Image: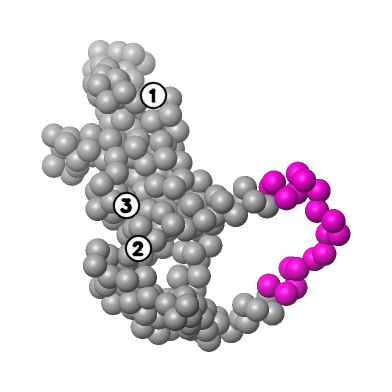
Amino acid sequence: MKELSKKKDVWDQANLKIEKFLGVNLNSSNESFNVSTGEDSKLLGFVRNSSTIIMQRKFDTFLNGFIKDGVTVEDQLEELIDFIDNEAKAEFIAETFSKIILSKSTQACLILGSMLGTLIKSKADIEYKYLVCVNVLMNLYDIDIINFKFVYLYINNSSSRRKTAILEGKKFNVYCDANDLELSSVFLTIDKCVSNQILNKYNEVSLNMDSNDIDSSDADVDEYFKITSPGELLYEQICKCNL
């Protein structure tokens, strides 16, 4: 009983710290959403229970990434409380917890936990790459994380000094097949990573000039991809979680 009271006290401290910097009272906010629906139908009850189960699973997975070996939940949360010392950090922590609930992947929850634990341990200010990573993790499916890991390795093993690669053609197709990846899903992941600043895409134009016949000259456009600093952070955390 004493242990449960201690755990609740730590959570209350974390909530109070976030309220302090964001100027929001969580209890009053919750009361405004408590709308009576009368007698719940069996379907509504099923939906509520299912939602609770999913949320609990996501949060448990988050804690698996967040809690360091040999450290109790309470001690890790006390480090989190100490970390929150300004409005930007309070907002970032609150946003991260909201992303856990909205995430589409349990693996993403694990990575979010690991990333938050890394940030708290560093005691550093929140860099832009962390903001980008937290945002993209909300939108990644488990398969996206698998696809990104292999795309990262493909680019990183590129012969280019700039660590760039063309993500198409026979070589890339063979690489995907060798790793049992569906090519269409890989390209969807690539598009998602580009739009969420995990990958950079740029074009290189090669001119094929015919000095004897200018009208016969043409140009080839190749799309190159490069890992961004948020992408590097994401891959680092994927490896840390042994995914």
Q: Where is residue 109 shown, x and y percent of the image?
A: 42, 53
For the residue marked with disc 1, what is the amino acid? Glu
Name the residue at 47% across, 77% down.
Answer: 1
First in sequence, mark 3 or 1: give its number: 1
Q: Where is residue 189 shown, x and y percent of the image?
A: 42, 36
For the residue marked with disc 3, what is the amino acid? Leu
**Tag shown at residue 66:** 2
31 drawn magenta? yes
Residue behind mark 1: 182
Q: Quadrant of residue 112?
A: bottom left
Name the residue at 16% across, 36% down.
Answer: 157
Q: Where is residue 133 shown, x and y percent of the image?
A: 39, 56
SS class of the residue under badge 1? loop
For the residue marked with disc 2, what is the amino acid? Phe
SS class of the residue under badge 3? helix
**Cα distance, mark 3 to mark 1?**
22 Å
Residue behind mark 3: 234
**Cα distance, mark 1 to mark 2?**
31 Å
Q: Residue furthest front?
A: 1
Examine the rendering and report whether any part of residue 102 can be seen.
no
